[in-house]
Image: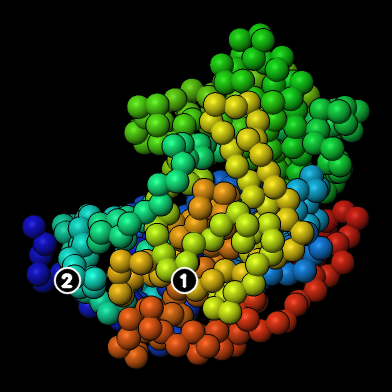
């Protein structure tokens, strides 16, 4: 039962404190809205921070032109001040122009300081469990706080939960265009890695890496390796690895002896797995990968499991049906939209839980626009969505789900929510040119301003001062 004495009222409520949710809450609060951010876990940062993603990506297109600015870039700048990232550096594997390695704990703390500076009220350990609707409007929601259920009322709501929890509880339709979504993973961080030996192996076995993968030095701050198919096949043949994989992604910090490995996977949802069952299966895979790394990977003899993601790495969940839907053709054609609120540029990256490698990855020649309609649920008047649950097809989601783009959709949703709350309008009736003007003033790129920002020329090797 909801305790009426614990009720809160706000102008804007944001559900989910990942990349999209943090950007939305900061943007809404800085736009003058009384903003509450409700997060199911005990910390902010979401998938990028606590699923231990190898790096943030999507800030630049294939030519090196920056396509994401605003709150996302401000977070990178703030994290650099704390020494938690070298900034945007060349992508050693050539998958994209740049990548942005982060120290995960420092990223979460930097985002927390930004939320504090913006005046956002943050509620932790508070999953959304119920939504009160009146026709097409959400009047309030309930969160299950540690001390009991709390009601939060607001004029506008932003669903940045990743799984579209708020929108689904409110009755929003979701896309059902594929029988199987992308798989879930559990990333792991190793310590005690001898990078001199590891990188020597990589340099001597270029055929075991993705074509064009540059091999760094033990003196580098960050390295990025994609491949190891020969060693993975040997591990599978010897019974060290039950999961058969032809590739893994390793992001390393050589001076610290740390490496994050992205290699595990299970169907999600599917094969009778709920989150708990998926976690148990992935835990076995994690331990097998650590054993394999110690026995077969040069430089891995003294490696140890330093950290495991605190949540499943879900690539694809509910995608809300919006007034517009981002498609594969939008992405690969670089389509422009008059209601653009930002830009994306990451390849279409599709994984298959039942295949040993990527299902496919479609590179794109230029950036594409993110139409405002993708953020507006077709069935609701005062809710916006941001992050991986925006309206997109399966393949469109393969690009837009990336963290850099989540910062962009989150910031746009936050500003739009504040404007709609202040003006007393529905999200569909919002003055889009006014929204675009506000976003441009905030440093957002691609809000139909026609401005291209050129990134600094990548250096041959990243350094601590790379930007």
- Contact, mark 2 vs mark 1 (Cβ under 8 Å): no
Q: Residue at x 73, y 51 (%)?
A: 363
Mark 1: few/some/many CA within 10 Å (<14, 14-19, 20+): many
- Depth check: give the residue in front, 367 or 412: 367
Residue 296 in view, yes or no = yes
Whole-percent x, y for residue 163 in the image: 39, 52
Whole-percent x, y for residue 259 in the image: 67, 39
Q: In the rendered image of this protein, does residue 62 appear above or below residue 67?
A: above
Helix, strand or loop at mark 1:
helix
Q: Residue at x 65, y 67 (%)?
A: 335
- Examine the image and state in which quarter residue 431 appears: bottom left
Q: Which mark is residue 134?
A: 2
Residue at numbered disc 1: 373
Left or right of residue 228, residue 190 in this image: left
Left or right of residue 152, residue 324 in this image: right
Whole-percent x, y for residue 97 in the image: 78, 57
Whole-percent x, y for residue 191 in the image: 65, 36
Left or right of residue 398, residue 20 in this image: left
Distance CA(mark 2)–CA(mark 1): 22 Å
Residue 186 in view, yes or no = no
């Amino acid at each position: 039962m909801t305790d009426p004495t614990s009720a809160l009222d706000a102008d804007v409520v944001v559900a989910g404190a990942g990349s999209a949710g943090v950007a939305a809450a900061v943007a809404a609060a800085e736009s003058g809205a009384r903003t509450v951010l409700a997060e199911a876990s005990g910390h902010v940062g979401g998938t990028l921070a606590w699923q231990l993603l190898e790096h943030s990506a999507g800030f630049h297109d294939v030519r090196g032109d920056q396509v994401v600015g605003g709150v996302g870039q401000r977070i990178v700048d703030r994290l650099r001040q704390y020494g938690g990232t070298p900034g945007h550096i060349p992508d050693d594997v050539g998958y994209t122009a740049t990548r942005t390695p982060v120290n995960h704990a420092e990223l979460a703390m930097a985002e927390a300081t930004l939320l504090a500076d913006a005046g956002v009220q943050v509620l932790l350990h508070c999953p959304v469990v119920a939504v009160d609707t009146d026709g097409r409007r959400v009047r309030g929601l309930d969160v299950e706080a540690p001390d009991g259920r709390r009601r939060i009322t607001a004029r506008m709501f932003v669903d940045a939960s990743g799984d579209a929890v708020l929108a689904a509880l409110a009755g929003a339709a979701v896309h059902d265009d594929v029988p199987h979504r992308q798989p879930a993973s559990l990333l792991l961080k190793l310590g005690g890695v001898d990078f001199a030996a590891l990188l020597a192996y990589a340099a001597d076995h270029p055929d075991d890496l993705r074509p064009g993968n540059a091999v760094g030095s033990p003196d580098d701050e960050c390295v990025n390796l994609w491949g190891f198919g020969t060693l993975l096949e040997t591990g599978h043949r010897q019974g060290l690895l039950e999961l058969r994989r032809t590739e893994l992604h390793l992001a390393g910090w050589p001076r610290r002896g740390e490496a994050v490995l992205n290699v595990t996977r299970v169907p999600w949802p599917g094969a009778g797995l709920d989150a708990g069952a998926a976690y148990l299966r992935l835990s076995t895979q994690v331990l097998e990968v650590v054993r394999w790394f110690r026995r077969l990977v040069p430089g891995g003899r003294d490696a140890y499991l330093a950290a495991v993601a605190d949540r499943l790495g879900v690539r694809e969940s509910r995608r809300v049906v919006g007034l517009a839907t981002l498609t594969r053709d939008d992405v690969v054609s670089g389509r422009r939209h008059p209601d653009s609120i930002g830009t994306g540029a990451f390849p279409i990256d599709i994984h298959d839980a039942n295949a040993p490698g990527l299902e496919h990855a479609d590179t794109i020649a230029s950036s594409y626009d993110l139409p405002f309609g993708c953020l507006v649920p077709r069935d609701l008047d005062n809710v916006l969505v941001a992050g991986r649950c925006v309206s997109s097809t399966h393949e469109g989601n393969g690009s837009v789900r990336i963290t850099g783009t989540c910062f962009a959709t989150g910031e746009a949703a936050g500003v739009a929510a504040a404007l709609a709350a202040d003006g007393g309008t529905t999200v569909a009736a919002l003055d889009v040119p006014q929204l675009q003007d506000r976003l441009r003033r905030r440093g957002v790129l691609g809000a139909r301003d026609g401005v291209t920002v050129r990134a600094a020329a990548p250096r041959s090797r990243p350094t601590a001062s790379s930007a």
